[in-house]
């Protein structure tokens, strides 16, 4: 008996970024915390929690945002904000990307229908790789 056809995806864009975790640890003090709201959505901040791994999680999400912007060839500024790329946690626990405004428009122009996201971090570095894909044909 044959299994049902599985969809093939075509890679449209790829981006990667690495971030310094201690930089985000410094931003967790009372003076800098307000600045985090210009980079991360309320959901992102809530999902990162407030514990010993918060800086690693924030750095991973920021690396994801940067990787998406690099993949799409969009510079920060000129109508593109870090809040326009949102890293959320899927039901499976895996990171997922939601885009907004100009970032979403650019992704659509290029044919990106979905994002494959991988992040990893240590106490010193966080890295993210994103692949924008579109559906091909069922095989």
Image (cartoon, rainbow, N blue to C red):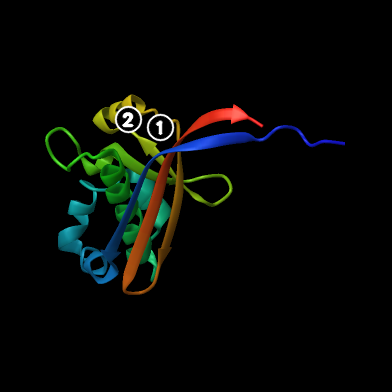
Say whether residue 84 is left or right of residue 130. left
User: In the shown orientation, is residue 92 left or right of residue 47?
Assistant: right
Residue on which the image places disc 1: 112
Q: What x and y, as percent, mark residue 19?
A: 27, 63
Give the quarter of the figure containing the N terminus: top right
Per the image, the residue denoted by label 2 is 104
- The answer to whether residue 9 is above or below residue 94 is above
Q: Residue placed at 21% from the left, 68% from the top?
A: 26
Quadrant (top left, top right, bottom left, bottom right) of the C terminus: top right
User: Residue 37 or 19: which is nearer the viewer?
Assistant: 19
Give the CA distance from mark 2 to mark 1: 9 Å
In-front residue for pair 135/63: 135
Which SS class for mark 2? helix
Q: Residue 79's x, y, as percent?
A: 15, 32
Give the residue drawn at x 45%, y 54%.
118
Outermost residue on the bottom side: it is 123
Relative to 123, is 73 on the left or the right?
left
Image point 34% across, 64% down: which residue?
Answer: 126
Q: Earlier in the sequence, mark 2 or mark 1?
A: 2
């Amino acid at each position: 008996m044959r299994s049902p056809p599985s969809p093939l995806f075509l890679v449209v864009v790829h981006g990667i970024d690495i971030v310094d975790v201690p930089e985000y640890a410094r931003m967790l003090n009372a003076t800098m915390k307000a600045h985090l709201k210009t980079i991360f959505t309320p959901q992102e901040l809530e999902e990162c929690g407030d514990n010993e791994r918060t800086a690693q999680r924030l750095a991973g999400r920021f690396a994801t945002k940067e990787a998406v912007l690099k993949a799409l060839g969009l510079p920060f500024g000129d109508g593109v904000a870090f809040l326009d790329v949102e890293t959320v946690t899927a039901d499976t626990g895996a990171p997922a990307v939601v885009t907004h405004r100009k970032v979403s428009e650019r992704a659509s122009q290029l044919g990106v229908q979905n994002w494959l996201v991988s992040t990893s971090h240590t106490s010193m570095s966080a890295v993210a790789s994103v692949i924008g894909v579109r559906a091909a044909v069922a095989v």
